[in-house]
Image (cartoon, rainbow, N blue to C red):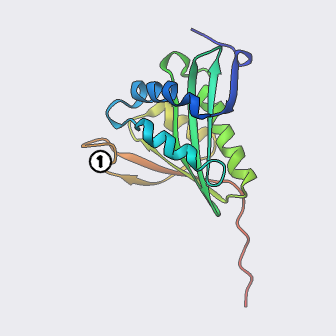
Amino acid sequence: MNVTRTDRLLRRMRWWDIDAVHALEERVFAETAWSRETFWSELAGVPQTRHYVVVASGEPIVGYAGLMAIGPDADVQTLAVASDYQRQGVGAQLLDSLIDEAKLRCCSRLTLEVAAASEPARRLYLRRGFEVIARRSGYYGPGADALIMRLRVRSEPEESAP
């Protein structure tokens, strides 16, 4: 199913989205899926330290993403897209929203963990300027490593010489 970008709406995630988001989370992440309680906890931090968005195509939520931002550091907490909507720009739309939010919050760095085996996700992050800075063995379970990636969102001020 191809859906044009104009048929998709990016908006803030609300508490009434949690059931639909959790159902998508379980389909995408299976045994490592967050619980409903985790989503409730994350939304409790909005807007102080969290920012969560969803993409809806008509009524169903087809993707979601979340950001944690504290001081100069931001972290992509989660990003998922329904299988029927992958490779159609939904992930890029979500990621761009998180990058924009990190810039609005004056963050210097944006980091994330991605499954080393997830070639499409890695390509998306690399296209947006992320670089691999570390690898965590077994992060997603035995034999399922994570790559830690970072994007410099804005230049950090240079230290002046004494």
For residue 160, side relative to residue 28 (left or right): right
Residue drawn at (40%, 28%) of the image: 26
Q: Is residue 103 above or below residue 61?
A: below
Judging by the rendered image, the residue that carries numbered circle 1 is 138
For residue 27, side relative to residue 86 (left or right): left
Label 1 secondary element: loop
The quadrant in which residue 156 appears is bottom right
Q: Which image quadrant: the N terminus?
A: top right
Q: Residue flagged by tag 1: what amino acid is it?
A: Gly
Residue 100 rendering spot, x and y as whole percentages: 72, 44
- The answer to whether residue 96 is visible is yes
Point out the residue furthest to the top here.
1
Residue 88 rendering spot, x and y as whole percentages: 61, 20
- The answer to whether residue 89 is visible is no
The quadrant in which residue 4 appears is top right
Residue 61 rendering spot, x and y as whole percentages: 57, 22
Query: For this rendering, which residue is in front, 101 or 122?
Result: 101
Query: For this rendering, which residue is in front, 94 or 156?
Result: 94
